Amino acid sequence: MAHGTSRPVVDRLKIMFRRALSNEIVFWRALTILLGVFAYLKGARLPTLYIATEAQLNYDHGLVKRGLFGAFWKAFHVPIHHYAVFAVVSYGLLAVLIVALILFIRRAHLFADEVNVLACAVFFSSYAFTYIGHLVGRMDILLMTATLLVLTIENPWRRNAVLLVVGPLCVLLHEMFVLTFLPLCVLPSVLNALEKRRLKDGALEALLFAVPVAATWVATFALAWLPAISGDQAAQIQADIVGRIDFPVGSHPWKLIRQSAVMTLALMLGWALPAYNPIAWFISAFIFLPPIIFLTLLACNMLRASNDPHPRWGAAAIVATIAVPALMNVLGTDLHRWHTFCVFNAFGAVGIVMMRSRSRTRATSPHWRNGAILVIALNLLAGGALMDYYKDAPYPYHDHIESGFKALHERHLPAPH
């Protein structure tokens, strides 16, 4: 009796399984979600003590860079100086980022047809998505969330009005916003300006986004040229943070805020950049270039298909938006972190082009599908160092490859001076 009643259930499951595999769009949607879950789990962790300590900066001792986060939570009496509370807040903000991603995907119709869902599959399977999840607790999560929420506003006047406020606030969270995500925020307006056939209309559109861009850069330069805090002020900030937190100190943010952007640039040019290991660049290119190339080509192809009057200029704007975060290599040594932002911007560019396009592709061509499968396979193979000396460990042969390249480097290349 039990056997007889179980047969219809098994048959229904078989039918559902066959339909899922035979329907392209359903299959790719399910695969995208599965790939995203596994990509995230490769780098999942709790916020580090380094991040938790830096988050304690606020404005109790004057205006300092990266102090807005701590000041905000203090104003609302949220005790992020307790590590457990900070961890809950950090994962709450990560959840908000995921919601913002879903909202952006819905607004851009990236789950609506086969070509668009390929972009989602490539992005969510990438090591960049692993890295984004690994950044839990960092200001990067808030910056990406703010960027996505700005991009979901299709009305250019409202979008740029919001960016006029959000841009300077993001700079107060982390000054890297101008080089990482501001170009993506203004890309819709840039493409709109290039779409105008009359110079007057294009100039008006350019003026519209020039105002929030100028405000964001003014805030950045104002922070960069803040007078350095004294040693006594730094000691007071140190004593205040150490006296409040209930976890071991994981970093020295009181030293960080004494270092201006000019000092950081001089340090990087004088020491860090010459000491960069070429093997690290090779590994980073293997990890991040495949999804960047695929998403960039897809965005440019969609732009050309939308009958844009200046597709070459539009493609140049897309490529520049995707490449600009790589300039952060001049200001910091977090190689994979900056290239993760390039992948994020490439995915954002695909969504922006789709939001501007009124046409919807109903079926994908074999070369896009096969290209996506190839990139996804490379994404699954990719792995490397994460933030704060963490390392993903799903592929045991990666260490052997890296050690082989190091041996080759030591034998045939001169050591850096």
Image: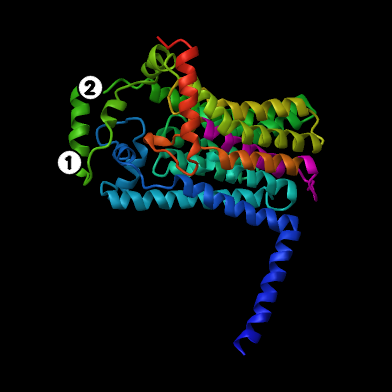
Amino acid type of disc 1? Gly
Element type where label 1 sits in the image = helix
Quarter of the image where one finds residue 202: top right
Report the number of discs: 2
Q: Residues within 10 Å of mark 1 (few under 14, many from 20)?
A: few
- Residue drawn at x 66%, y 42% is 351
Magenta-highlighted residues: 339-367
Which residue is under mark 1? 243
Q: Is 350 in the magenta? A: yes
Residue 369: numbered disc: none
Q: Is residue 304 left or right of residue 338?
A: right
Q: CA distance from mark 1 to mark 2?
A: 20 Å
Q: Which residue is mark 2?
A: 230
In the rendered image, residue 187, in percent from the top left (x then y), is placed at: 64, 33
Task: Please state which amino acid type lies under the numbered disc 2.
Answer: Ser
Q: Please tell me whether residue 276 is drawn above or below residue 387 in the rendered image.
A: above
The magenta stretch spans residue 249: no
Identify which residue, 289 or 283, lies in the foreground. 283
Dot 2: what SS?
A: loop
Sequence order check, earlier mark of 1 and 2: 2
Quadrant of the image occupied by residue 22: bottom right
Nearest to the observer: residue 280 or residue 167:
280
- Quarter of the image with the N terminus in it: bottom right
- The residue that appears at 44% across and 32% down in the rendered structure is 171
For the residues carrying marks 1 and 2, which lies nearer the camera in this image? Answer: 1
As rendered, which of 116 and 150 lies closer to the eye? Answer: 116
Residue 91 visible somewhere in the drawing? yes
